[in-house]
Amino acid sequence: MAEVGLDDNGYHAKKRVTIVGAVANLLLSVGKVAAGYLGQSQALIADGVHSLSDLISDGLVLVAARFGSAGPDEDHPYGHARIETAATAAIGVLLILVAAGFIYDAGHRLLAENALWQPGWLALSAALVSVLVKEALYHYTKVVGKRVRSGLIEANAWHHRTDALSSVVVIVGIGGAMLGVLWLDAVAAIIVAVMIAQVGWGFARGALGELVDTGLSERHLKVLRRRIERVPGVRSHHSLRTRRMGSDALADVHIQVDPEVSVSEGHRIARAVSDRMLRTLEPLTDVLVHVDHEPSDAAQRTLHLPEPEAVRAALRRVWQPLLPDDAELRLHYGDGTVQVDVIFPWPADARLERSDIEARADRLQQAAAQLDYVARIRLMPVIATG
């Protein structure tokens, strides 16, 4: 089976920063558990276990970055960016669970102060090292996340920051215990746990919003609407919709153009709309423009009309023998009617009188009167050459 290709849009940077974080978390977790046991600090042992949860997070990030950076395939035509989104939501939930664990542990220690250990300088030193290492990891990971435009990597950066905050709680707790203020650690732990829960909720809410196709902000939509309205050839627009896909955004919109323009001109106008929208917002990577030739309310009145081939067959039936076999019928649907352009060849050496064209058009119009959906008939002779 062929391997899904990866784009070079930051995957290697995501992989490198995640591996660095995973190695650091492994060393910190082992070091804090050992120092907590030898230094008689229950809080530091709990903080070491918390660092172990970061290893789970790093593994989740690494797997999600690997598959989330894969390009489109047959089963995922829009790419795999939503894998990062789902992983970001998982990290948010993980942060909330960790915060709940802090609150439970702090409450238990408040109710059972006699069960607290008496930590020393070894535990305090280990907690200080943890803060410095985790804060450095936070800044490094956040810079990489912004550079590769990955919400998942930025979410993991904040996970490093919350781990640093938990170590600050340990420092306060150890320091308070060493000074005899045993309850200070538990109170600080609850405060920081609430902060961690808020960060986790922010990530989870944003990611879940993306998973249910929450669109761009109204501010961004107003900017896009102004850009669409300024494109020459656009009479109006409606049904502008957006959704996020990882760090990217997708959009689709209906535009109304002059019903008399050709298909190719309508396509060019739509392309101009798409190009301007893509240049307006950096996250926007794909725009689908649907071209309408009339307002949506008028289009509703056209839905009951016969299909084009049925209309042509009916016209040729009522116009026989008035219509040459080599005549071309071009149909224009609009406002509940069909307007017909009759294009027929005209010999180059034959005289072309306006009165002849008008007389022929009148005969065609009278013959088509039995088709109540046919409105205007327009003859368009083409001078035959060669």
Image (spheres, rainbow, N blue to C red):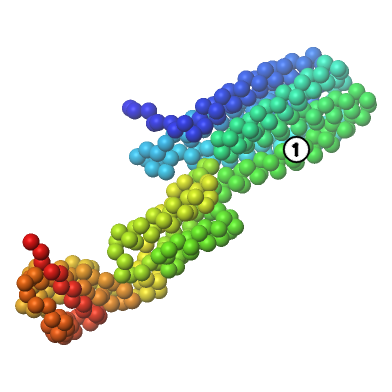
Q: Amino acid at mark 1?
A: Ala
Residue 371 left/right relative to 140: left
Quadrant the C terminus occupies: bottom left
Instruction: Please name whichever residue, 136 or 348, is drawn nearer the observer in this view of the structure.
Output: 348
Query: Measured from the top left, where is residue 369 in percent x and y?
Result: 18, 84
Residue 226 left/right relative to 33: left
Secondary structure found at label 1: helix
Residue topped by disc 1: 193
Q: Residue at x 18, y 67 (%)?
A: 309
Asked whether residue 297 appears in the rendered view, the answer is: yes
Q: Residue at x 45, y 65 (%)?
A: 237
Quadrant the N terminus occupies: top left
Q: Name the image quarter holding residue 57.
A: top right
Eyeballing the image, is 298 above or below 278? below
Instruction: Tell me if mark 1 has few (under 14), some (14-19) or many (20+) residues whose alpha carbon lies within 10 angstroms of its own.
Output: many
Q: Residue at x 51, y 44 (%)?
A: 248
Query: Measured from the top left, where is residue 372 in percent x and y?
Result: 23, 82
Query: Measured from the top left, where is residue 152 in percent x and y?
Result: 58, 36
Instruction: Please name whichever residue, 287 or 93, is drawn nearer the observer in this view of the structure.
Output: 287
Q: Residue at x 6, y 75 (%)?
A: 350
Instruction: Please name whichever residue, 345 or 258, is drawn nearer the observer in this view of the structure.
Output: 345
Q: Residue furthest top?
A: 38
Query: Measured from the top left, where is residue 219 in percent x and y?
Result: 60, 57
Q: Name the image quarter holding residue 338.
A: bottom left
Q: Name the image quarter holding residue 323.
A: bottom left
Residue 201 left/right relative to 248: right
Residue 92 left/right relative to 337: right
Asked whether residue 213 appears in the rendered view, the answer is: no
